[in-house]
Every structure is written in structure tokens, then in C-alpha cells.
Amino acid sequence: MIRKHIPFFLIFLMLSCSGAIETGNNRYNAETKQEKPVIVPVFDPDSAYHFIAQQVAFGPRVPNTEAHRQAGLWLAGQLERFADTVYIQQTRVRAYNGTVLNIKNMIGVFQPESRRRILLCAHWDSRPYADYDPDPEKHYTPIDGANDGASGVGVLLEIARLISEEAPGTGIDIIFFDAEDYGRHRFSQLPEDDSWALGAQYWARNPHRPDYNARFGILLDMVGASGATFRREAYSMLYAPNVVRKVWDTAHRLGYGHLFLNTDGSFIVDDHYYINRIRNIPTINIIHQDDSTLHGFFPEWHTTGDNMDVIDRYTLQAVGETVMKVIYGE
Ligand code: AHN
Ligand code: ZN
């Protein structure tokens, strides 16, 4: 009699256990399946390349010049094509040398009604001086800034185009900052303090909406050169380590680990610094850092060599695909 009871009890236990396991598995599967299917539109590096070439064709986009004015009108028009709402912040700021600069920050808003928002940004001006040019005669020549400036804008215009066709699950704000690159000339005796990122400093103190906030921000700076390497920039790690982790993990999963290096970069005072310090929005900088050069950036940095010849579609694709995956995964 006892022998009969034991097998029945064991069978009951086994059944209930396996049942529990199955239920658990099913629930887990159901939950995984319920996660919204993430359809990420395909980033077109040729399109991004063309957006860069169009900016460079205006000539150096130095504040107070006709090329800057014309490029600004063109850029605002592109943003109008894609965004739901466009804000143009026109103002004057004082450069380190006393020059008053007429500048425009441009903000493209996608899904203005959405409360969950991500900020994407780049600077659209180019540097007035090639102060690292190998030829000393060119140290006061303005630069094309194909990589330093136009590349970030080109990637973001392509992202804007894709967002306008297939909205992600979160609101997006794309900001093109002016006067990032009017920082102190390397041979000037004047103080360097806060001479960079003048447009971003203005926006951080005067956002397009007084209550503006975003869950996080991503700055793209020098994201188009061949052989680019992106290190974990130090202010990004200080203010937004989780965002760095998220973006770098995404890049690695997409097979771009050879560009997004798991090594620490240096502190770069760039647009994201003021967004973090003044607006408290955790914002990272995806910026090409290179240990082998004197200044730590790509070899043609702040030289007349920063032209279309340095632009590589593969780098644009790596950055564009990674940022697209991050924003459509949110
Ligand atoms: C400094 O050299 C302090 N900041 C560089 C930021 C920059 C210049 N990004 C592009 N051009
Ligand atoms: Zn620069």
C-alpha cells in the first residue's frame, strides 16, 4: 500500500513541477514576444555623404560670412523638410577676441507631444583658422570642416530624413549648434576659458522651450573620417556613463567594436559639456580621438586638409546605424 502511494506522489510532483516550468517558460516567451518589434529604418551612408558635400560646397561656414549665412538658410530648409516643428535661435555672442558673432542655433522637433525625449546634436559652423595646418601660411585660413562640423550634421540630417518617414517610439530633438569652433587660436595670448561652444552655451542658458528636458543626449563631432576611433570621452563618462555604455554596447553588437573602442579618452570641452553642466541633461560625445597625433584628434584636425577627401562612408554608416539602433530601441 505504501509503495503505491509513493509513485503517485512522485508523479504528481513531477507533473506539477514540469507544469510550473512550462508556465514560466511560456510567460517568459510571451513577454519577449510582446516587446515591441523594433523596426530600424536603414541608414543610407550615401545620403549622409551627400548632406556633408552640400554643406562643404558653401565654403567655410564661419560666422559673419556670406557662406555661413547661405549654409544656414539651406540647413534650416532641410530641417523644415523633415521635422514637425523648427525653432531658429538667432542671436549675437562675443568671441574670445571680442568679435561679435551673428549666430543661429537650429532645433528640429519630432513628435512635440511626446514626453519621453532624446536629444541629438552637432555643430554646423566651421573653424575660422587652420591653426594646426602643416603650412604656417595657412594658420589663419578658414577650413572646410568636412569632418569637424559637417559630418555630424550630415549623419543627423540622414537620421532626420528616416525619422520623418517612420517615427520611433520616443520624441527626438535634433539641434545644430553654431559657433562651436570659434575657440581661441592656438597662438593667441588671450584667455581660453569658455571660448568654445558659444552656441551651445547660449542654448543651454536659453533653451528653445524654458522647461526643456530630455532623458539623455548624444553629440556627434568628427564622425566621418576614414579610420575613425571613438574612445569613451571623459566628460561623457563623468556625466552620462550609462549612456556611453548603452551606445558602445549597441555599436559592439552591430559589429563596430573596432571603431567604438573600450578605452578611456580625454576630457573634451565641447557642446555636450555645457548641456551637462548648465542643463543637467546627461549627454555624451561621440568624437574621434587619436592617441598618435599631437592634439589627440584626427590627423587633419584644424587644417585645410579637413575636406571631403577625409570622409569615409563606412564611418558614417557605423555611427548612423548605431545611433538609429539606440533611438529606435528606446
Ligand atoms: C578644445 O580643444 C578645448 N575643444 C575642442 C572641441 C572641438 C573643436 N570640437 C571640434 N572642434
Ligand atoms: Zn574644431
Image: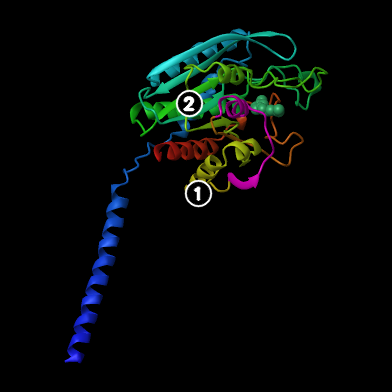
Ligand 1 located in image quadrant? top right
The image's mark for residue 255 is 1
322 in magenta: no
Query: Where does the N terminus fall, quadrant-wise?
Result: bottom left
49 relative to 266, above or below? above
Residue indicated by mark 2: 213
210 relative to 40, above or below? above
Q: Quadrant of residue 44?
A: top left
Give the amino acid type for the residue marked by disc 2 in the picture.
Asn
Q: Position of residue 56 (x, y in %)?
A: 57, 20
Query: Where does the C terminus fall, quadrant-wise?
Result: top left
Numbered disc 1: secondary structure = loop
In the picture provided, is 88 more to the left or to the right than 287?
Answer: left
Q: Position of residue 30 (x, y in %)?
A: 27, 53
Which range of residues does the magenta coloring cover? 259-280
| Residue at disc 2, CB closer than 8 Å to ligand 1 | no
